[in-house]
Amino acid sequence: MLNFYDYWVIGGYYVLLFGLGWVYRRFGHDSSEYFRGGGQMTWWLVGASAFMSSFSAWTFTGAAGLAYQQGLIVLVIYLGNSLAFLINWAWLAALCRQMRTVVVMEAVRARLGRVNEQFFTWLTLPLQIIGSAITLYALAIFCSPVFGFELKAGILICGLAVVFVSAVGGSWAVATSDFLQALVLMSITVVTAAYSLVAVGGPSGLIEKLPATHWDMTASSAKEFGICWVLATLIQQVCSQNNLLGAASRYLSARHGKEARKAALLGAGLFAVGTVFWFIPPWVARAQGLNMAELFPTLAQPEEGAYVAMAHLYLPAGLMGLMITGMISSATSSMDHGLNRNSGIFVRSFYLPILRPGAGEKELVLIGRLTTVIFGMVVIALALMFSSWKNVGVLKLMLNVGVMLGIPSAVPMAWCLIVRRAPDWAAWSTVVLGLLMSCFISLAPTWGWMRDMCDFLHMNGVLGEMELRRYAWTAFANFFVGSIWYLAVTAFCGNRLSARRQEEVDAFFATMHRPLSESETGSEADVAQQSLRIGRTALLWGGFIALLLLIPNNWVGRLAILFCASFVAGVGAIIVASGQKSLRLSGTRSVDCLRQSPCSAVVTPSSKR
């Protein structure tokens, strides 16, 4: 399916990816730098990284399969993401940065105590590992038919590459690669959508040929979908990204609260714009009547290859390889972000306070690298296990894990930022209740005594409805029952914290609402150097893409290549110009500062909170 030029592009991408990991290995002087960039990252870097880590290759496999089968309902997932980022911007982004912790579990300790810190540490680690494994599985589904190798080989190759970059480069390599990958992804998906629209006869051709049922935003003609599915998905997307665990991990690396809010707004915009283009190719595939089962007979869910099919049919030489790098980047960004986050939680919330309270920063960074490798191997093993499951699609895996395991942990983490009076045990007990609800809804339809009871009460259809709409039932039950439980515990058992814990809770909220001082945000010169470094890398990658103009393509193909190269290099040029300007201005301010008054001491990355 690929030609020589496509392999050349993919090879260049991997050289860039490994190069980033190697270059940024020297930026992990301490655990703060290694796990969150020392809290020095600019808004566009944080926003692009948050955007890329919020979706993965399953967008172009599982979600593309849903678009192919059901139409516009797939937009609900991604517009829900955009809405979640908007709420981040309006409410949580600045507050999360102002928590002044290195990893999110340290904020959990301050707000909910040490018991909850350990509880959520050992709850979150498996959840993140499972999510990363699903991401890797989705990438392998995409790559295997393209490269022509077995699914398991794809999992091993892609997984090992991500583990290397995450372990060696830390948060700086992760964030920088996310930013560069976002540039490539946005440009190539625009080109793929344009080619697909031309193939179907433009927007009017798509409207005419796409089945009428595909224009129903709720897909009400399909039994498992409908308005309940839409509402459940919106709850899952918004709830999972607007809580102490989901939001704080994104914005702790930003320079200050204002930059964190800008990052959230950027993420909302990228999702809103990207959604317009991402699903045009699978819709066109359905409009043209492409038979996915014939094209991808080895896939458990052949419709998940719809995006690959369109790219293969219409993209010119070289751009197919660039599109593959975009798909790989969408998966690696989610997986490497998860690995870096997990290793940070393990090191800062278990290894340091429990196993080695006196550990130095070099030891913490070393353990962080080793933990990243170990977690990466577990992720690869789980992805291999998923690949052996038949008749289980990526979309179903991702959504079910989100409502069965994600919502129970998200509910108390959201309410604890709103309600101050709840006792600490309200958080972990809400999670336990949610997990029990998930198990009950999944298993109840299989219990004979439950069926007999429903027959006796003349409620024969309840179990069937529960089994058919398990996703929606689980989301509603976990969200509403969990919220009622947390608030009820607050109402009846509130104000029972010890004096010491009450002081800690009050200090947590006071810190969270206090803007960072100049000494906590780093110098403008550091930010300028960051912009120059990343901008020049984008220019280099844009120049590499421009070399594809030498490939023998028609003028339309070369115009598409020129667009991608110009987009990546153009953004890089803007960032470099901004960095140079900031460097000049920061130099002037430094001189003025020296003349007028003694400046504050230089804050090293390790001391920034």
Image (cartoon, rainbow, N blue to C red):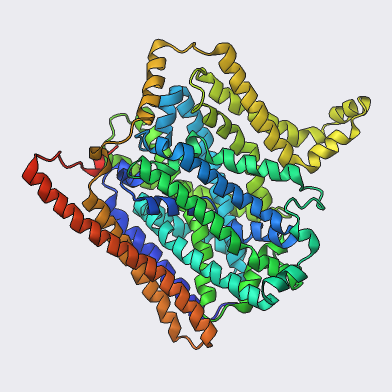
Whole-percent x, y for residue 511 in the image: 35, 28
Q: Quadrant of the C terminus?
A: top left
The residue shown at (63%, 22%) is 485
Which quadrant, please, contains the N terminus? bottom right
In-front residue for pair 304/258: 258
The image shows residue 253 at horizontal and vertical percentages of 36, 44
Q: Is residue 511 above or below residue 270?
A: above
Q: Residue furthest left?
A: 595
> Quadrant of the rendered structure where residue 460 is?
top right
Write the residue at 53% across / 88% down. Answer: 554
Number of marks in the rendered image: 0
Q: Is residue 371 visible?
A: no
Of residues 338 and 356, the one nearer the viewer is 338
Q: Quick check: 118 left or right of 442?
A: left
Q: Where residue 336 sits in the image (x, y, percent)?
A: 45, 52
Viewed as shown, does residue 431 lie left or right of 283? Answer: left
Q: Position of residue 107 (x, y in %)?
A: 41, 31
Q: With respect to residue 327, does 413 lie above or below?
A: above
Q: Tell me the residue at 35%/42% (across/down).
A: 367
Report the side of 344 relative to 145 (left or right): left
Residue 449 visible from this viewpoint: yes
Q: Nearer the viewer, residue 207 or 231?
A: 207
Residue drawn at (64%, 68%), measured in percent from left and top?
281
User: In the image, is residue 419 above or below residue 255?
Assistant: above
